[in-house]
Amino acid sequence: MTGGGTGLGLAIGERLARDGYDLLIASRSAAHLAEGSVRLRELGSHVVEVPTDVRLPSEVDRMIDRARSEFGRLDVLVNNAAGNFIAPAQSITPNGWRAVVGIVLDGTFFASRAAFPLLRESGDGRIVNIVASYAWMAGPGTSHSAAAKAGVLALTRTLAVEWAPFGLRVNAVAPGPVHTEGTDVRLWTDPRVVERLTEQIPLRRFGTPEEIANAVAFLVGPESRYITGQVLAVDGGQWLGRGVMDLTGEAEKDSEAK
């Protein structure tokens, strides 16, 4: 799993560890990996830490080679590594653009490509890519991430078709707003933004890392054997919005009552 030392990645790792998986976690930060692996090992999982910059194919290849040498197999790949920051499109520098697109889109492709031989050998290989609802909508303030996630969504569907004959399933999870250590520092820094976002979510709350992890666990589990090329939005209905208009007025009444 890429991006596996903190935040959503760690929550996904904890859920998979509870389900009995041994784990290889990758991140650019060795410190994050060291911290995360302690919690994962407490759950009884055999955990391998591999510092990896997913933008570099050579490092990604080394990560997959480590999986082969440590476990002799690979059943699941979770592409969770991400980079993001808020800025209007005209203010994003070429380096800022390349950094985000490189981690999100290039990294997902490099990891999937490198993992393909082992996943094929598994006979039941599964890939889950972490995207966002602005992959098919609009992401003002995050044009770099929105473009990259849209690419990952297209890649998810394309690989699902190309690799189905090899027994591989490829799906995606699209989290809505979630509080993690990283998002609270980089994204949810303004309480007014958090309030506005919450108002736009039909269920009127942010999600939890555990809820995202549960969705990933479903897509790699036996209950989803006939599901591939899909994106599961776990966002409290955010991407649906509140509709073009509320003809009943119930949403406003409920909001005022609360």
Image (spheres, helix red, strand yellow):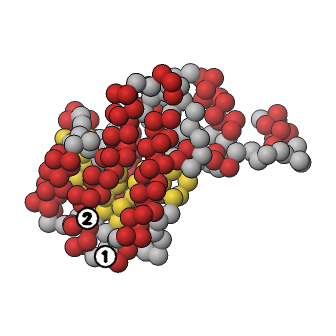
Tell me if I can see residue 210 in this picture. Answer: no
Find disc 1 in the rendering and name its residue: 166
Which of the two labelled residues, at mark 2 and mark 1, occupies the earlier sequence position?
Answer: 2
**Three-letter residue code for mark 1:** Phe
| Residue 201 found in image quarter | top right
Work out whether residue 229 or residue 19 is closer to the camera in this orientation and state it.
Answer: 229
Asked if marks 2 and 1 touch (Cβ < 8 Å), the reply is yes
* Residue at 26% from the left image edge and 44% from the top image edge: 54
Q: Is residue 58 above or below residue 179?
A: below
Find disc 2 in the rendering and name its residue: 116
- Label 2 neighbourhood size at 10 Å, few (<14), some (14-19), many (20+)? many
On the rendered structure, is 103 left or right of 208? left
On the rendered structure, is 80 left or right of 49? right
Tell me if I can see residue 98 in this picture. Answer: yes
Residue situated furthest right in the rendering: 248
**Three-letter residue code for mark 2:** Phe
**Quadrant containing the C terminus in the rendered view:** top right
Work out whether residue 86 or residue 257 is closer to the camera in this orientation and state it.
Answer: 86
Q: Position of residue 92 (x, y in %)?
A: 44, 25
Work out whether residue 199 or residue 138 is closer to the camera in this orientation and state it.
Answer: 138
Q: Position of residue 111 (x, y in %)?
A: 27, 53
* Residue at 45% from the left image edge and 32% from the top image edge: 183
Q: Is residue 246 above or below residue 75?
A: above
Q: What element does badge 1 sit on?
A: helix
